[in-house]
Every structure is written in structure tokens, then in C-alpha cells.
Image (cartoon, rainbow, N blue to C red):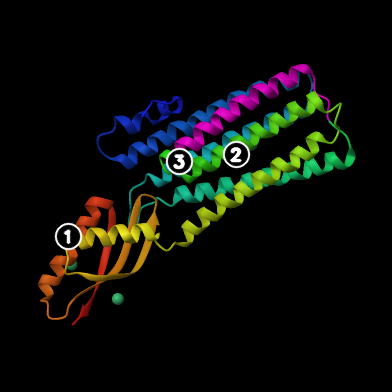
């Protein structure tokens, strides 16, 4: 596999020999901090520039960028809480904090998209477009590129380390990149087609709303608790059949995910004349194999079969 540019952030993962979960989180931390810092720099720059050329639009946009630092900070808080070990009150660990962070960022993103939609409709209706100076257009062009790079990094790394909050934050960066791009396009061609940035704004905001819906749907479903996917069931059945050919009819799966901590219960059938000690040994063996091979914490219920 070739080394790609964003993988610099995955350095802790590649370097780690033990505790994969911890190093994955470290990569996520670095990415999120990178987003916070870059957004803060863009904020400071836009704010000062907007102040200097007394552009209300740019100062307003600067505040939005500062709020972007804040959403990336929620990713960091999510990782931080998720990294805490299990305690008496939370015996399954804190892994779901990451999903909750993703939920919060997703809700913020849908608000951003709704506002964007509203502004685009108003702009289309009033036939007014804001005039930007060449200087502002240059700044928005640079912002577009930087934000898209942040989006690209966050989404790719989020997928690699399986972090929904980082992916959601990445989509927020992308929506910001598209919004800045529309300002540039509108400023360049708005004189010819007054309706252009309004129409494109509606298109982009609907697209972002759809993405947000998809993200929130997945996160909520995960938090509510999901049926294990058929692939996972098949994998478990295969492991059991391979090691314990006399165990039959694996059924009634329940799975509970808490970040990287996975709890699984299911039923197996064992001969009814088997000794309890023997049956228990088998169950413990299966539990140990699933722990070793799939890092799943399982509890198995036995049904007798004649
Ligand atoms: Zn934003
Ligand atoms: Zn059963
Ligand atoms: Zn036992």
C-alpha cells in the first residue's frame, strides 16, 4: 500500500505494538486538534481582515469559523470521555461518548444547513447579492481549499479509525468549503446570473441536510442498539463450527456496542445428557476464542437437544 498524505496523522497507529484502541484514539485526537487550530487561524485572519476592510459579511463569517473550532473541540471531548476506563457506574466503559459527540456535531451541522437553505431562499427571493471586494474573494478562495483539505483528512481518518464523530466533523468542514466556494462563484458570475448563488445554495444545503440525516440515522441506530449484521453472525458460527463440531444451532443473538467494547449474548444447543461441567467448559472455551479472535465479550446460554 502506498503512503498517502493524510496518513501522517495515523503515525501513532502504525507505530503502536500494543493497545490498538488507544493509538487509534490518539490519531483521532491529533486530527481534531489540527482542525481546532487551523479553524482558529482562519478565524483570526478573517476577523482582522474583515475589521480592516470593515466588511460585516466577513466578520460574521469569521464568527462562524470560530464556532467550527468549537465543533472540532466536541470531537476531542468525545474521544477524551470515551478513553476513560470502565468504572462502577459505567461497567461497559465510556465508548458511546464518541457516538454522543457525533450526535451533537450532527445536530449543529443540520442547523448550519438549515440556515444556509433559508439564506439561499431569501437571496433568491430578494434578488440581492452581496458585493465582495477582490480581497474578500481571495480570502474565501483560500478558505475553500483549506476547508476541503480538512474535510478530506477528517473523513478519511475517521473511516480508517472508525470514528463517526470525526467523519461528521469532516462533513461540516466540507459544507463550509462548499459555502465559501459558492461565495466565490457568486462573486465571479453573479453579475451575469443573479439567481446562480441562490439556486446553488439551495442545492448545496439540501445535499448537506441529506448527508446529516444519513449520519444521524446511523448514530441514533447505534445508540438505540442494533441487530448484529448477518456477516458477524456467520463469522461467529464459523468459528464455533470449526472448533466445536458437536455444538449445533447457534441462535438468538443480542449485541451491545460501547465503542470498542462489544457485549454479545447468544444461544447454543448441546446434547441433553452432557455433564454440566463438560458443557460449561465448552461454553468458556467458546467465550475465550471469541474474545481472542474478535475482541468480543460474550455470554452464552445453553439449550438441551436430544
Ligand atoms: Zn461551519
Ligand atoms: Zn435458545
Ligand atoms: Zn461460568
Q: Tell me the crowding category of disc 2: few under 14, some 14 to 19, or many 20 or more residues within 10 angstroms, Cα based.
A: many
Residue depicted at 45% across the width and 50% down the height: 97
The residue to which callout 3 is attached is 159
Q: Is residue 180 above or below residue 205?
A: above
The residue to which callout 2 is attached is 172
| Mark-to-mark CA distance, 1 and 2 | 47 Å
Query: Looking at the image, which is closer to me, 223 or 234?
Result: 234
Q: Is residue 300 above or below residue 271?
A: above
What kind of element bears circle 2? helix
In what quadrant of the picture does the N terminus appear?
top left
Q: Is residue 55 left or right of residue 233?
A: right
Q: Tell me the crowding category of disc 1: few under 14, some 14 to 19, or many 20 or more residues within 10 angstroms, Cα based.
A: few
| Dot 2 or dot 3, earlier in sequence | 3
Q: Is mark 2 within 8 Å of ligand 1?
A: yes
| Dot 1 or dot 2, earlier in sequence | 2
In the rendered structure, find residue 105 and report the number of the disc placed on it.
none
Looking at the rendered image, the disc whose residue lies closer to the viewer, 1 or 2, is 1
The residue to which callout 1 is attached is 243
Q: Quadrant of residue 197?
A: top right
Amino acid at each position: 500500500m502506498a503512503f498517502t498524505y493524510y496518513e501522517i496523522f495515523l503515525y501513532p497507529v502504525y507505530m503502536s505494538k500494543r493497545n490498538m484502541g488507544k493509538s487509534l484514539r490518539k490519531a483521532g485526537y491529533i486530527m481534531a486538534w489540527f482542525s481546532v487550530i487551523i479553524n482558529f487561524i482562519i478565524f483570526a485572519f478573517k476577523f482582522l481582515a474583515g475589521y480592516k476592510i470593515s466588511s460585516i459579511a466577513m466578520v460574521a463569517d469569521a464568527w462562524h469559523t470560530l464556532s467550527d473550532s468549537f465543533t472540532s473541540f466536541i470531537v476531542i471531548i468525545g474521544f477524551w470521555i470515551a478513553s476513560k476506563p470502565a468504572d462502577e457506574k459505567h461497567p461497559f466503559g465510556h465508548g458511546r461518548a464518541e457516538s454522543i459527540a457525533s450526535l451533537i456535531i450532527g445536530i449543529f451541522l443540520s442547523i448550519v444547513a438549515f440556515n444556509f437553505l433559508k439564506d439561499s431562499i431569501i437571496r433568491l427571493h430578494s434578488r440581492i447579492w452581496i458585493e465582495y471586494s477582490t480581497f474578500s474573494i481571495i480570502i474565501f478562495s483560500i478558505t475553500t481549499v483549506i476547508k476541503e483539505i480538512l474535510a478530506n483528512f477528517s473523513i478519511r481518518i475517521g473511516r480508517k479509525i472508525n470514528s463517526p464523530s470525526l467523519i461528521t466533523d469532516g462533513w461540516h468542514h466540507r459544507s463550509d468549503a462548499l459555502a465559501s466556494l459558492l461565495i466565490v462563484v457568486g462573486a465571479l458570475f453573479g453579475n451575469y446570473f443573479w439567481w446562480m448563488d441562490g439556486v446553488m445554495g439551495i442545492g448545496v444545503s439540501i445535499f448537506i441536510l441529506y448527508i446529516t440525516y444519513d449520519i444521524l440515522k446511523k448514530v441514533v441506530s447505534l445508540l438505540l442498539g442494533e441487530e448484529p449484521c448477518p456477516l458477524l453472525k456467520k463469522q461467529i458460527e464459523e468459528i464455533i463450527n470449526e472448533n466445536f463440531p458437536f455444538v449445533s444451532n447457534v441462535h438468538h443473538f443480542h449485541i451491545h456496542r460501547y465503542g470498542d467494547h462489544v457485549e454479545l449474548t447468544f444461544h447454543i444447543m448441546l446434547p441433553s445428557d452432557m455433564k454440566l461441567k463438560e458443557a460449561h467448559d465448552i461454553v468458556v472455551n467458546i467465550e475465550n476464542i471469541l474474545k481472542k479472535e474478535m475482541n468480543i465479550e460474550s455470554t452464552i446460554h445453553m439449550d438441551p437437544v436430544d
